[in-house]
Image (spheres, rainbow, N blue to C red):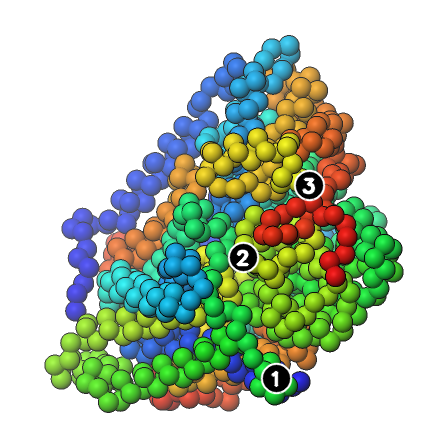
């Protein structure tokens, strides 16, 4: 696996993260809980594959499933919260998860060496099981799912709930179901993404899942636009890959990154994919003869 | 000694209040969070430290000069940030300013990392902020109090009162309140909304400057990442107190200070975050709009 | 209301993305298209944190390394196959920046191995990135592409031994802490100790857990009080209060610079005067005495070199001249790392041809395990079985705002 493949894999993981963040924004919920689910998925999958020898995808699905359930459990109490209050409550969830892993010590001897999560010191020698096709394969599945949902009645319900969740129930939309389902799907996507991340880097620690990751998620949806799923995907890809081409800036690389973010946001205030671009894309697809 | 924990918690909490007041003021007026508030604190702190170092750092005169430097730097930076990160994004929804202010924060932090290596009076990781206030302490009975925390407490209360006076009694303040409640109506009433917003930014960032100077003095050092550390707690404070409520920010800061102090004393510092967020969840479940919010529904 | 005016073209973002992609393809090709090894060089790589929180350490390390490379080349270079060959940092001028993102370490390692085709890599800086890097070395072995990764900066006590390809020439304090604890318990007769830890920092937390506490126990010192705080904390009143009440003889501080200065200052304010303060390398920074003033006088810390010694005077002056700042432990280690590699290269018998690169890397690894050099600090150093250098070190203390060698006498 060359350098380009590695960068593509990292970009792919960031894109998955962006998608999981997008899902709750799509329904109008400002949720920052995905970092916490990413962490849970990472540790869960790492423990299953490394400590108990599970193969990758069963481990991912198991962790993802647990995250989905937790997503539902989190979604319900959060129904009452809106806007920045919701953001902060979900941020609190992610931070609590991080503190949990900072204090989690669970080691079992593997070939004589104690292995497992060790609090602040992290979880080392995680079995490297993630290939680039696992990442992009899951991304494809997620994209297909989102496109399908978009075109179904659920998509209309989601759009309606996002636009105005006070009026939506009068149109017969069960917004409780919609919001909790969004939380669940986002949590599961993040859980599986986190598991893929752990299987890729071979070492995870609580610091990986801190506030900077939350900020990154916000950047992806802000720059990409919350209107479409491919906006945040594009933003994630650009923000991961573009700085690589500016490595010659060495010490100034991060300043460049900050400037890039400001410029992108100022040039496209409603996101890279805003209403106009989205409408143009839809029109382009509509030109094709519809499948029966 | 629980009493001392409580009192020290209150006094230290005023630090958080000072930071949060400016943060929530901006939110109140434009309904957006200024993530660069932390970076503003940091830059102002550096300005104050520089002035203090250059003036010898031993006299209260130097401290006063440093304070003035910090406040002016903060206000100026605030105006700059408003121009660059908020004004161009008027129609952009609530997420866009997150990105631009986060970008600015990254730029400023890296810039100061670099500056602190290059400028002779600065040091690579932490630069000292000398002052006569840092070691001032006294005993109120059996309780030990740090002078600088008392000063911060008094300054925070004074600023809160001054803000209150400004908002309630002056024309510009009332204009700001009108903009807060309904920008469209304000405009129809002839209020220059742009100028009100700029003023709010300048004042709030000036407050950040004051916070930067006082925090720098209390810790004794300034560093490129000091702002970000404070910002996270500020989120909790302003949500606890109710977004946009200045009194809420004041009370919220004190509450957080006490909670932290008690947690460290009774449990251990490593549970501070967990306890704080637990408290936050509790408050949001009972009162989703925060303790002292003025409105029941938050427009976003 | 003002709208930012959109450019007239129909799909501006698509154009920009295409442009970026084209540039990207060009950039990626360009780096691989250079001729492999210039006739007269051996390529060494570097992955340090040049931006972000760890950058003060990473920048010291890379500057030290660059100074060493210049010195080595000025003396003719390294001897390969009987000829003198230049060392070249690839890519210049500063290697790669991993920033604060530990996952990038993997990508950059790959790039150094496959695109830059270096013989060995120096770095990473932070304990986090080093863990990721060393763990990944095992994966690289499976892929058939391993490389020596030599970290001059990460000091976590249990990072050695993760991979036979991972080396560290950082200063490891277990030995010197053992010596100082033996001293205070037997010669000074101290009995009671307190430990203050910053718990969310991997280095200081693991030092406390794996070195300090076992050390205290081994030497019969009872831990009568404990304090902890988070990295971002600036107020230590509660912790000092608790420590003060227990009246320990020894207070061992396992914390980064700001917390160390903070707790000692708070102690000074409250009149808490234990018989001795001990610290770790996490607290050592050239400006620490200045930041702490009188409050940090008397703090005892182990270091791999004596700042005032003759051996490092030349290096200190050269570093000051080149970078306008004062060298610290990390800069010295960076300098040392280049010389360790030089010794390894010369002992390895590499052929330094494109076809033999994988084999050369393996030879270098094997040679490094046996290498022994006299470091710029004056000490003979070599790697132990886990790939960590064993250094005797010096006990330093802060006196009159300077680091001086400790005279091993009690302060009070």
Q: Kindly state the secondary structure of the residue where label 1 is placed.
A: strand
Judge if badges 3 and 1 mark residues of a common chain. Answer: no
Around disc 2, counting alpha carbons within 10 Å, would you say few (fewer than 14), some (14 to 19), or many (20 or more)? many
Around disc 1, counting alpha carbons within 10 Å, would you say few (fewer than 14), some (14 to 19), or many (20 or more)? few
Relative side of C41 to B36, left or right: right
Tell me the quarter of the picture where residue C206 sits: bottom right
Location of mark 1 (residue): B143
Relative to C17, does residue A82 appear above or below in the rendering? below
Q: Position of residue B292 (x, y in %)?
A: 42, 88
Location of mark 2 (residue): C291
Instruction: Count the marks.
Output: 3
Q: Which one is nearer the viewer's eye here, C96 or A213?
A: C96
**Image quarter hosting the C terminus of chain C:** bottom right
Q: Kindly state the secondary structure of the residue where label 2 is placed.
A: helix
- Give the CA separation, mark 3 to mark 1: 43 Å
Location of mark 3 (residue): C304
Q: The numbered mark 3 sits on a residue in which chain?
A: C
- Give the CA separation, mark 2 to mark 1: 27 Å
Relative to C205, does residue B238 appear above or below in the rendering? below
Relative to C181, does residue B182 appear above or below in the rendering? below
């Amino acid at each position: 696996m060359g350098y380009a493949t590695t960068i593509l894999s990292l970009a792919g993981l960031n894109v998955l993260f962006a998608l999981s963040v997008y899902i709750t924004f799509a329904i109008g919920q400002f949720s920052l809980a995905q970092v916490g689910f990413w962490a849970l998925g990472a540790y869960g999958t790492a423990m299953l594959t490394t400590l108990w020898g599970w193969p990758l995808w069963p481990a991912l699905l198991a962790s993802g499933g647990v995250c989905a359930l937790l997503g539902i459990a989190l979604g319900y109490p959060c129904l009452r919260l809106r806007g920045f209050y919701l953001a902060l409550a979900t941020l609190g969830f992610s931070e609590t998860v991080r503190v949990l892993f900072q204090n989690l010590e669970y080691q079992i001897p593997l070939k004589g060496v104690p292995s497992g999560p060790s609090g602040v010191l992290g979880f080392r020698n995680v079995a490297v099981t993630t290939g680039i096709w696992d990442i992009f394969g899951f991304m494809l599945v997620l994209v297909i799912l989102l496109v399908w949902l978009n075109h179904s009645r659920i998509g209309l319900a989601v759009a309606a709930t996002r636009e105005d969740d006070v009026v939506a129930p009068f149109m017969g939309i069960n917004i409780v179901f919609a919001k909790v389902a969004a939380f669940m799907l986002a949590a599961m996507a993040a859980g599986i993404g986190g598991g893929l991340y752990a299987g890729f880097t071979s070492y995870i620690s609580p610091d990986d899942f801190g506030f900077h990751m939350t900020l990154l998620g916000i950047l992806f949806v802000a720059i990409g636009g919350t209107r479409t799923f491919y906006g945040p995907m594009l933003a994630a890809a650009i923000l991961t890959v573009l700085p690589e081409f500016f490595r010659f800036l060495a010490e100034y690389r991060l300043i460049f990154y900050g400037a890039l973010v400001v410029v992108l946001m100022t040039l496209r205030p409603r996101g890279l994919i805003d209403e106009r671009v989205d409408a143009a894309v839809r029109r382009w697809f509509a030109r094709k003869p519809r499948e029966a | 000694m629980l009493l001392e924990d409580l009192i020290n918690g209150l006094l230290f909490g005023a630090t958080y209040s000072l930071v949060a007041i400016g943060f929530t003021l901006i939110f109140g007026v434009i309904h957006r969070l200024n993530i660069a508030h932390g970076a503003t604190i940091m830059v102002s702190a550096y300005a104050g430290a520089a002035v203090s170092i250059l003036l010898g750092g031993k006299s209260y005169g130097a401290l006063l000069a440093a304070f003035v430097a910090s406040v002016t730097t903060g206000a100026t930076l605030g105006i700059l940030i408003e121009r660059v990160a908020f004004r161009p994004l008027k129609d952009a929804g609530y997420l866009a300013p997150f990105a631009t202010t986060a970008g600015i924060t990254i730029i400023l932090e890296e810039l100061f990392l670099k500056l602190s290596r290059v400028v002779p009076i600065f040091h690579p990781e932490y630069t000292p902020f000398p002052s006569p206030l840092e070691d001032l302490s006294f005993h109120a009975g059996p309780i030990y109090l740090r002078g600088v925390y008392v000063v911060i407490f008094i300054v925070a209360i004074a600023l809160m009162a001054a803000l209150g006076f400004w908002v309630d009694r002056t024309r510009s303040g009332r204009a700001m309140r009108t903009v807060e409640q309904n920008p469209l109506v304000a405009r129809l009433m002839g209020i220059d909304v742009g100028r009100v917003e700029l003023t709010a930014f300048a004042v709030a960032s000036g407050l950040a400057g004051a916070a930067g100077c006082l925090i720098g003095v209390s810790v004794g050092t300034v560093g490129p990442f000091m702002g970000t550390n404070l910002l996270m707690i500020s989120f909790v404070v302003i949500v606890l107190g109710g977004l946009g409520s200045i009194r809420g920010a004041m009370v919220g800061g004190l509450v957080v200070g006490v909670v932290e102090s008690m947690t460290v004393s009774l449990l251990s510092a490593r549970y501070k975050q967990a306890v704080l967020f637990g408290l936050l969840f509790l408050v949001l479940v009972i009162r989703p709009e925060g303790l002292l919010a003025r409105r029941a529904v938050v427009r976003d | 209301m003002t709208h930012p005016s959109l450019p007239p073209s129909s799909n501006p973002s698509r154009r920009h993305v295409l442009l970026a992609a084209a540039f990207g393809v060009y950039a990626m090709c360009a780096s691989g298209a250079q001729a492999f090894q210039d006739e007269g060089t051996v390529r060494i790589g570097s992955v340090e944190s040049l931006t972000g929180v760890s950058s003060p350490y990473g920048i010291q390390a890379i500057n030290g390394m660059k100074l060493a490379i210049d010195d080595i080349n000025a003396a003719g270079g390294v001897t390969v196959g009987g000829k003198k060959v230049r060392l070249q940092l690839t890519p210049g001028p500063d290697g790669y920046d991993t920033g604060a993102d530990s996952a990038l370490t993997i990508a950059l390692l790959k790039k150094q191995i496959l695109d830059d085709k270096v013989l060995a890599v120096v770095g990473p800086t932070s304990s986090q990135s080093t863990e990721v890097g060393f763990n990944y070395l095992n994966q690289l072995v499976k892929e058939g592409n391993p490389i020596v990764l030599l970290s001059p900066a990460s000091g976590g006590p249990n990072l050695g031994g993760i991979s036979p390809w991972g080396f560290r020439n950082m200063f490891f304090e277990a030995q010197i802490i053992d010596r100082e604890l033996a001293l205070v318990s037997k010669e000074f007769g101290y009995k009671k100790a307190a430990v203050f830890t910053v718990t969310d920092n991997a280095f200081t937390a693991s030092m406390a857990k794996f070195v300090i506490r076992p050390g205290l126990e081994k030497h019969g010192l009872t831990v009568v009080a404990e304090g902890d705080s988070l990295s971002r904390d600036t107020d230590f009143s509660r912790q000092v209060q608790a420590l003060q009440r227990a009246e320990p003889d020894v207070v061992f501080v396992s914390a980064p610079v700001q917390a160390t200065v903070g707790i000692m200052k708070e102690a000074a304010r409250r009149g808490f005067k234990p018989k001795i303060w001990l610290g770790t390398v996490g607290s050592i920074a050239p400006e620490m005495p200045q930041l702490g003033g009188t409050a940090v006088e008397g703090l005892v810390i182990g270091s791999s070199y004596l700042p005032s010694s003759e051996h490092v005077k030349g290096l200190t002056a050269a570093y000051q001249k080149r970078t306008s700042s004062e060298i610290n432990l990390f800069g010295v280690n960076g300098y040392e790392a280049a010389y360790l590699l030089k010794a390894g290269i010369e002992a390895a018998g590499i052929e330094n041809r494109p076809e033999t690169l994988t084999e050369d890397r393996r030879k270098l690894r094997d040679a490094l395990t046996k290498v022994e050099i006299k470091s710029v600090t004056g000490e003979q150093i070599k790697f132990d079985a886990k790939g960590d250098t064993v250094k005797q070190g010096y006990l330093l203390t802060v006196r009159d705002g300077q680091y001086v060698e400790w005279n091993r006498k009690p302060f009070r």
